[in-house]
Amino acid sequence: MADFLEYSSISSEVRGAMCPGKLKMTDTAMVFKSDKTGKVEQINSSDIELLNYQRFVGSFGLRVFLKNGSLHRFLGFTGDEVKIAEFVKKNYKLDMLEKELSMRGWNWGSVQFKGAVLSFDVENKTSFEIPLNHVSQCNVGKNEVTVEFHRNDDAPVSLMEMRFHIPTSESADIDPVEAFQENVMKQASVISVSGDAIAIFREIHCLTPRGRYDIKVFQSFFQLHGKTYDFKIPTSSVLRLFLLPHKDNRQMFFVISLDPPIKQGQTRYHFLVTLFQMDEETNIELPFTEEELKEKYEDKLTKELSGPVYEVLGKIMKVIINRKLTGPGTFIGHSGTPAIGCSFKAAAGYLYPLERGFIYVHKPPVHIRFEEISTVNFARSGGSTRSFDFEIELKTGTVHTFSSIEKEEYSKLFDFIVSKKLNVKNTGGKASYKDDFADSDNEGEPDAYLARVKAEAKERDEDDDGSDSEESTDEDFNPNQQESDVAEEFDSNVESSSDDSDDEEGSGGDSDDGSGSDGAREKKRDKKKEKKEKVKEKTPKKKEKKENKEPRAKKSKKKDTGAPKRPTTAFMLFMNASREQIKKDFPGISITEIAKKGGEMWKELKDKKEWEAKAAKAKDDYAEAVAAWKASGGDADGEDGDKGEKKQNKSTPKKSSESAMKGSGFKSKEFIEGDDSSSDDDKKKGAKKAKTSESADKKKSKKSDSESEMSESEEELEDEDMSEGSD
């Protein structure tokens, strides 16, 4: 077994800042993987020239100097100096010595250039070192050199500039200031456009940063040239390349992940997102000979490239930058494409599940690796049952929420999550979603709207029962009710405005003839007083009826607890026998999924005779049990009583309607006016109305609560009116 050492929480120096990650030392290489970007850097043991200890605050680090002149630093080791020294001596055949540093606070010394490192020494001991790939520019003056550094967005404080004063010497053949600048610029990462580009793509639609840019690919960098901005991006800052199909199957996203990002004012762009039409094609001839292509790129490129623009660009970038081109994995969504439509931070976009992570495009683009994920969660989307939210919680505590995903995508996404062995936060996963997101229109599912309406009705009934208000509220129609809260036209105790108007009309007729008397006026006053008294009498009756309303509403069919249970169907017998086996075959399956799986098994079962025979036997046993139960009188108080009550309820409305049709001798004012033909008839009808009101007064004084007595009184009143009419 090969010998190796592995350390976590180790930091590597990248662009002047320490990037956390993991370091693995094997007998052939040192491999560092960044926790932030996932980028892997490998240093072969054969390339290492020197390996030293270097003291830092609170810990020590490794200073790895390569044969090509580049320098790598790793820090965060505590107490493993001896173990690492033994490993290096055994596998790399190198002696680890501590790098001695100058502790004097002098600001003058000598400058040494070794490879890509500038070392400032005081008394032959290193005071500080500058990796020259951190230098962005070097300017000279008369006796001064100014060194500028790349800005580091991750560091809270960045060193942007250093100035060196170099005294001149007349005896020197070479100007030391120019020599200093030349040595710095040889190794500095200063991008300057020189020579022809390998490939040029014109007017590319760029979503991030927004605009139309010409993309020019060079050997060590590529350039975005627009009307306003111009970006030069070194190939070393490219982390990953993505080629993702749009959901409409007519466009293609080409995404470039960058670290460090490009800057436009105060805005930082960690991703370049370009959009291509699938039917756009191009033809490019590379400025290389066949021998150069074979030597430099190992025949991965041909001299002439033709095809869709996104395909040609992706192939060139993949070979020149030496990064893998990542595409969608095996995931196919409900729409038949690998893209899931969703919203992120109030902007619509697409989420792509990849083989090793997720990527969202395009505003803002987000790339999440599986190893960064702590848990995922499926949640309700703003109370809607037509969509859901997909939450990804990282190990750092950050939560990314992708909302408004169609619920049809759930099963596909959940199966993908399970296949990648990601931790689902809401235990039960699929079952939890089915319970929370099921459509309320489906049969058997709870209706939230109906439940809310019932709750409001119950609160309203409680308010009505507890209120002392004399105002009338909506009443339930009950044909069994002997008395109505509101007097109807056909009731014998009716007091309506039409009676008064008819009386006034009759008396008015008499007065027109000069036969009006004071007795008629007194009679009207008495009637008005009686009206006020009866209104007061009606109020307590309303309260009594409201108090009696609740017991009437609670009438329901009584169930006999001794009644035999209905027989089990063939499917349920099969389901009860298969439930435990399903649980064993599918550990952790939810209750709803057990029923679904049982239904599928029942559907696939060809021979169902065994279960149908058991169901038939259960049905026969049930019939015998019902017969025995009825013979013992178990059905007498239940069904018969309810049937009798129903018959009574059905007959009551009919009786009420008949009494309404027969009614009292009352006629409306319009009907009376329509029958008026002469003044003699007016006199007769006026007299008839007076008699009718007298008989009605007698009836009211002898009023009974029985409905049958009331109808008999109305028939007598009708016969009396008919006899008067015949006279």
Image (spheres, helix red, strand yellow):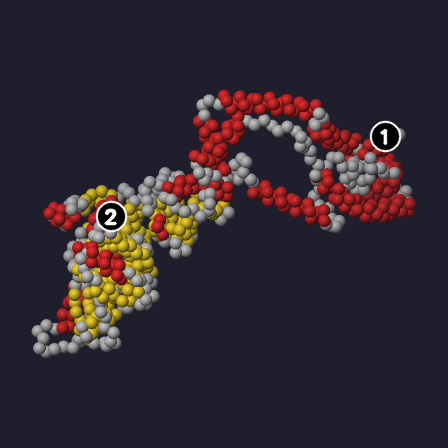
- State the mark number for residue 1: 2
Mark 2, Cα crowd under 10 Å, few <14 / some 14-19 / many 20+, is: few
**Residue marked by disc 1:** 719
Residue at x 53%, y 35% (from the top left corner)? 443
Residue 466 seen anywhere in this rendered image of the structure: yes
Left or right: where 457 falls relative to 101: right
Residue 317 seen anywhere in this rendered image of the structure: no
Indicate the quadrant where residue 55 lies. Answer: bottom left
Mark 1, Cα crowd under 10 Å, few <14 / some 14-19 / many 20+, is: few
| Vertical placement of residue 291 versus 644, above or below | below
The residue type indicated by label 1 comes to: Asp
Between 555 and 505, the residue placed more toward the observer is 555
Q: Give the x, y percent position of residue 441.
A: 53, 38
Q: Quadrant of the C terminus?
A: top right
Q: CA distance from mark 1 to mark 2?
A: 120 Å
- Tags 1 and 2 touching, CB below 8 Å: no
Between 206 and 65, the residue placed more toward the observer is 65
Left or right: where 655 falls relative to 303: right
| Vertical placement of residue 123 versus 203, above or below | below
- State the mark number for residue 309: none
Q: Nearer the viewer, mark 1 or mark 2?
A: 2
Residue at x 90%, y 42% (from the top left corner)? 515
Between 329 and 47, the residue placed more toward the observer is 47
Residue at x 67%, y 32% (from the top left corner)? 561
The residue type indicated by label 2 comes to: Met
Q: Give the x, y percent position of residue 145.
A: 19, 72
